[in-house]
């Protein structure tokens, strides 16, 4: 059962007010350190550090500041400054500059060269295994600072939108680390913006009583958490040092083990988490990775939703044509034939607006179109977070949205959460009544595991490395290949259209010929009836061309008799009326 958030005790608030919120110089660094090839002298000067580096016969002056438990500074060579970092583990100094790291050890000080300090150290200091300052941090937390009295940790919690949720998400981590439930002494939330808050606690670590403070600051769908704890006997200076470090250090990104995969065409590489599958074959393709439990990031291809504005002249024209057609059918007393539905002619209709306003209107219409095409439908539920982003192109409206969706997995509805960048692209001069809505990157996972999967997906996205020289070369080759393919496709379409035109002409000619033959046959049949009714047939003298009409019932005998008289069996020929009027071509 979640703990109740109680009013913060006065001592906790006072400790935050009276303690200066600035980092104090860490006096562990001053001294002489020697390594195999390098020696360093470090001197404290009022909260900063100076000194020298000795490399063989070369000497380089240094200047540095203590930040998050390490030295960050520069050394000078030939008038040029070069950055370095240094960290201490006991009396061992790790010095890093560029790609080189050196290990050095502190030289023992002259026991007679320093007077006894005013406050001598504890003659029986706690061992590393028993002091709170030497323990590790909870899983997923980074160490911002550490002293003999305590530590400061920092982390990020994704998917957190309230102060109460941030504190409640932190408590189980601390319970596990300290080995028992914390005793919450009080908590508060900033009533002005409700974006920050804190909770105080007491606990026991290695048998010693400690007091601690949890602070949180809400951000872009995440909470930055800092945890500071000290021995109950700690001084205000101990608290000041740890609190300052906890508020200035950026929490480390959670470490996600990734396996590097190089794209076959040399355009780059990306890290892929265990169980996830890279679907893209090149950086030039949209990055698309799927997870083992229905997660996905990126997209299998570039796509967008084309939207027509409600005041489109095309819509009005279609509506008017439909009304005129219905009126025409009504005047004729006929039932109008079924017309194409308006949502088929114009599948998605909405006024131009920002993505967060457009998606609730557009997605239901888009899903109807998808279902009509027998494509799996993703039901849009609600938007939970909106963050404006710089426009992807001039005039576009670009936002990072988080929203909930439902889609069927193996026939079972499943709740998903999405984190996606969307852009609304306004109408252009050539299509002033049409605009588009396009996703520029999407991270999707089942709702129950989204926060954990988001960390993995963000890690994979950050791991993308691009070889730009190869990228541009491959992109150019693909562009030229598309041009060639488009030209070949265009030529083939032209040839196919010509073939179809010739085929249509041939079919038309054959059809016309068939119609003529059928008409000729009908006319010849009519001629036979006319000739039969008249009772005469034409006979022609093939030598003189003279024609005569003879009795139809005796035409054969007459023709034979005439040919016998002329002593030529082919001189006189009978011509039926059908051959005179409608001969066969």
Image (cartoon, rainbow, N blue to C red):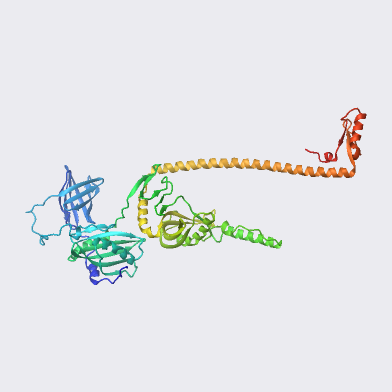
**Identity of the residue furthest to the top in this view:** 567
Q: Is residue 478 above or below residue 562?
A: below
The image quarter containing residue 227 is bottom left
How many labels, in total?
A: 0
Residue 496 placement, left or right of 36: right
User: In the image, what residue occupies the spot 59% across and 41% down?
Assistant: 494
User: In the image, what residue occupies the spot 32% across and 52% down?
Assistant: 256
In x, y percent, where is residue 225?
Answer: 29, 62
State which quarter of the image contains the C terminus.
top right
Whether residue 203 is visible: yes
State which quarter of the image contains the N terminus.
bottom left
The image quarter containing residue 330 is bottom right
Compare residues 106 and 17 and report the one nearer the observer. Answer: 106
Whether residue 245 is visible: no
Q: Is residue 547 above or below residue 362?
A: above
In x, y percent, where is residue 298?
Answer: 42, 52
In x, y percent, where is residue 483?
Answer: 50, 42
In x, y percent, where is residue 355?
Answer: 46, 59
**Identity of the residue furthest to the right in this view:** 565
């Amino acid at each position: 059962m979640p703990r109740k958030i109680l009013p913060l005790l006065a001592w906790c608030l006072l400790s935050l007010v009276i303690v200066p919120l600035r980092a104090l110089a860490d006096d562990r660094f001053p001294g002489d350190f020697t390594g195999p090839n390098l020696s360093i002298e470090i001197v404290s000067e009022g909260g900063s550090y100076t000194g020298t580096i000795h490399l063989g016969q070369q000497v380089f002056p240094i200047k540095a500041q203590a930040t998050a438990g390490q030295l960050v500074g520069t050394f000078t060579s030939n008038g040029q400054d070069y950055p370095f970092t240094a960290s201490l583990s006991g009396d061992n100094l790790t010095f890093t500059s560029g790609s080189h790291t050196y290990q050095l050890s502190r030289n023992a000080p002259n026991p007679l060269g320093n007077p006894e300090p005013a406050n001598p150290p504890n003659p029986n200091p706690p061992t590393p295994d028993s002091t709170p300052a030497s323990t590790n941090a909870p899983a997923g937390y980074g160490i911002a600072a550490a002293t003999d009295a305590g530590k400061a940790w920092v982390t990020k919690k994704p998917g957190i939108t309230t102060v109460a949720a941030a504190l409640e998400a932190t408590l189980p981590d601390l319970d596990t680390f300290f080995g028992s439930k914390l005793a919450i002494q009080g908590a508060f939330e900033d009533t002005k913006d409700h974006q920050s808050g804190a909770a105080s606690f007491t606990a026991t670590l290695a048998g010693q009583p400690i007091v601690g403070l949890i602070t949180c600051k809400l951000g872009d769908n995440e909470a930055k958490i800092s945890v500071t704890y000290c021995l109950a006997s700690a001084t205000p200076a101990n608290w000041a040092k740890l609190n300052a470090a906890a508020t200035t250090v950026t929490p480390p990104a959670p470490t996600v083990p990734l396996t590097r995969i190089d794209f076959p065409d040399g355009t780059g590489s990306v890290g892929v988490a265990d169980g996830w599958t890279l679907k893209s074959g090149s950086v030039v393709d949209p990055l698309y990775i799927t997870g083992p439990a229905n997660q996905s990031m990126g997209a299998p291809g570039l796509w967008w939703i084309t939207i027509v504005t409600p005041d489109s002249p095309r819509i009005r024209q279609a509506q008017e044509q439909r009304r005129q057609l219905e009126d025409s059918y009504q005047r004729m007393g006929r039932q109008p034939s079924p017309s194409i539905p308006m949502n088929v002619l114009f599948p998605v209709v909405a006024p131009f607006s920002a993505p967060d306003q457009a998606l609730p209107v557009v997605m239901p219409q888009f899903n109807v179109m998808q279902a009509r095409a027998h494509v799996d439908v993703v039901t849009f539920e609600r938007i939970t977070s909106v963050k404006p982003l710089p426009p992807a192109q001039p005039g576009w409206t670009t936002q990072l949205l988080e929203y909930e969706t439902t889609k069927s997995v193996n026939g079972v509805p499943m709740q998903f959460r999405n984190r996606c960048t969307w852009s609304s692209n306004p109408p252009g001069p050539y299509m002033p009544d049409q605009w588009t809505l396009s996703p520029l990157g999407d991270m999707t996972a089942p709702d129950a595991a989204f926060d954990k999967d988001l960390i993995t997906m963000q890690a994979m996205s950050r791991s993308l490395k691009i070889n730009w020289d190869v990228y541009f070369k491959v992109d150019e080759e693909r562009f030229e290949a598309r041009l060639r393919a488009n030209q070949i496709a265009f030529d083939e379409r032209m040839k196919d259209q010509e073939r179809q035109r010739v085929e249509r002409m041939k079919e038309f000619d054959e059809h016309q010929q068939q119609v003529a033959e059928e008409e000729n046959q009908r006319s010849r049949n009519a001629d036979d009836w006319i000739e039969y009714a008249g009772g005469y047939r034409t006979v022609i003298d093939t030598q003189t061309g003279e024609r005569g009409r003879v009795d139809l019932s005796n035409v054969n005998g007459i023709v034979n008799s005439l040919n016998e008289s002329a002593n030529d069996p082919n001189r006189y020929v009978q011509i039926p009326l059908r051959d005179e009027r409608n001969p066969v071509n």
